[in-house]
Image (tube, rainbow, N blue to C red):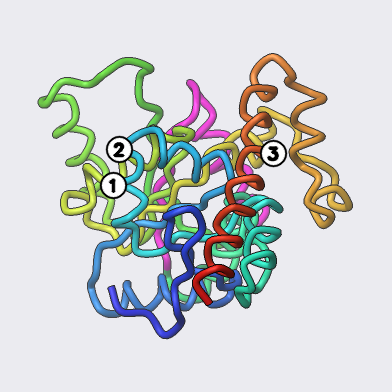
Amino acid sequence: MAVSWQRRDILGVAFDLIGCDAAMRTIDGWRRAGRREYVVVANPHSVLLCRRDPQMNAAVAQAGLTLPDGVGIVLAAGLLGYPHNGRVTGPELMLRLCDWGRGHGYRHFFYGGTAGVADRLAGRLSRMYPGLQVAGTFCPPFRPLDDQEDAEIVRQINDTRPDVVWVGLGAPKQEKWMHRHRSRIEAAAMIGVGAAFDFHSRSAAWAPAWMRRGGMEWAYRLARDPGRMWRRNLDSPLFLLRVGAQRLRTALLD
């Protein structure tokens, strides 16, 4: 896909180090052109998953946009000398695009979450943003789907004529799902936003604004859910060590 900026390599992942406004303009361009693309919002854990999981790597490599989530990505960009515009988190992008899209007739479909979460999410966003067009919701079962079930879900989504399909399955499941369905879902953009479903439905607590501004959500989530988050956070120092090695290799080649 042609872009108007240079994609930047961080440990083999090509990032679009743009801000939220540029991301929304890009999505709107896809919509106007009748394109079907998907958006990955990647943090250090996602980058290391790409190194361990070939299917995840292929999914991220073919995304229309790969946006910088996590303060570690911004630190890496700075260390590597890349110009950047800060972070674009999934929860932030969801709120911004739902708000902005009201004036442009956007229709939103919410796919993911545990039972009832997508409905609560759609209801709360509709109250936050009067006039929001909710095309539909669907919470998939936590088991593999057979081909017939998958085809029926695709039909249900496409019948609602969405412009954006928000996918909240968690990494790497959501990236692989978008990759497999990129030519089948008739929407301008599928956007993998993970925990945004839980945060904006209030099924889980979102970090306070001051912690989000400081890039400290990881500490908040670790404190609230250490049993699940500690393994993921082990990836952060490993990620930065490998970025340091990338910087050294680049300096030696200059």
Residue furthest front in the image: 252
Determine which quarter of the picture holds residue 88. Answer: bottom right
For residue 58, which numbered disc appears in the image?
Answer: 1
Kindly report the distance in space between the C-alpha atoms of the residues bearing marks 2 and 3. 22 Å
Q: Which residue is mark 2?
A: 54
N-terminal label among 1 and 3: 1
Question: Residue 117 appears at what percent x and percent y?
Answer: 54, 29
Q: Secondary structure at mark 3?
A: helix
Res. 129 visible in picture: no
Q: Which residue is mark 3?
A: 237
Tag 3: Cα neighbours inside 10 Å, few (<14), some, or many (≥20)? few
Q: Secondary structure at mark 1?
A: helix
Question: Residue 34 appears at what percent x and percent y?
Answer: 23, 73
Kindly report the distance in space between the C-alpha atoms of the residues bearing marks 1 and 3. 24 Å
* Magenta-highlighted residues: 106-130
CB within 8 Å, label 1 to label 2: yes
User: Observer-nearest residue: 143 or 124?
Assistant: 143
CB within 8 Å, label 2 to label 3: no
